[in-house]
Amino acid sequence: MTFITRFAPSPTGPLHLGHAYSALLSYDMAQAVNGRFLLRIEDTDVSRCRPYWEEQIYDDLGWLGLSWEQPVLCQSEHLERYNAKIIQLAEMGLIYPCSCSRSDIRAALSAPQEGVPPTTVYPGTCRHRDMCSRQPGDALRLNMERALEYVSSKQLEFLESGPKHAGMHIVSPQELQRSTGDAVLGRKEIETVSYVLAAVVDDAKQDITTIIRGEDLFDTTALQVLLQALLDLPTPHYHHHKLIRDNAGKRLAKRDDACAIAKYRADGLTPCDIRQKLGL
Ligand SMILES: [Zn+2]
């Protein structure tokens, strides 16, 4: 089986050292086994994505010495593909519309309910609603309990090769209920799917064998594995890598322009300097 991995940035700001680490590591791991390295632009959130940042991504990655297969998959061009999966899940009776605002959810969570342990996941206020009652602006949520029943005959598991969590992981339904609950799969702001569903659909579409990404996303893997099982898609291997932190030990964010690749380029650093900084 050919090793296939992807780097999947969102064009919402400059790439920083953390992105460079993820992209270079993915590229190197693919090169080491004669595998394939793909680039995917995760731009379904039109309110935050800009063509300028997409161009900057290509420019920075090229400068770092990476090359990738053409054409690049831009998610904004495939919304029908994700909506088809939403419809599929709806026909399975696994999703429902939700009109709750953040403050509705906070209020419901703080209302004491006898015998129900405290939780921070969505309390299920709209769970009784069916899809016919969907209004414009409603989010779409996964009915976690039903979804878990649906896949109860399957073993939910994934193989992890990253340094911190290496090994086989069994996804516990109870843990998914407790930590994730009725996850949003369709966003209310724009009529489109959540990041996690689009990513699962495209990982299968692009035959990704190994997902390489930061440790901060480790906990979202369980939901992805569940979605793969619900949609009859293969579960790839996962490799969660260390996070690159700034000098103060803080995780880098898109707004931290100080660590933007463009800034290092302007300062005259070379791609070798970047690799050295990152220990690659
Ligand atoms: Zn609701």
Image (tube, helix red, strand yellow):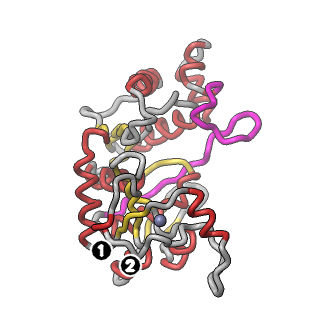
Residue 70 position by quadrant: top left
Residue 31 visible in rendering: no
Residue 108 position by quadrant: bottom right
Residue 268 visible in rendering: yes
Residue 89 position by quadrant: bottom left
Residue that numbered label 1 is attached to: 93
User: Which of these two is toward me, 278 or 187?
Assistant: 187
Marks 1 and 2 sit apart, C-alpha to C-alpha, by 8 Å
What are the residue bounds of the magenta stretch?
234-258
Query: The N terminus lies in which quarter of the figure?
Result: bottom left
Name the main secondary structure of what is drawn in magenta.
loop
Q: Residue furthest bottom?
A: 115
The residue carrying pointer 2 sits among few (fewer than 14), some (14 to 19) or many (20 or more) residues within 10 Å by Cα, namely some
User: Does label 1 or label 2 sit earlier along the sequence?
Assistant: 1
- Residue 213, compared with residue 228, is above or below; it is above
Which secondary structure, mark 1?
A: loop
Question: Residue 279 in the image: x percent, y percent?
Answer: 61, 36
- Residue 155, compared with residue 34, is above or below; it is below
Question: Residue 219 in the image: x percent, y percent?
Answer: 55, 61
- Asked if residue 276 is among those painted magenta in the image, a careful observer would answer no
Residue type, numbered disc 1 = Gly
The disc placed on residue 146 is: 2
The disc placed on residue 57 is: none
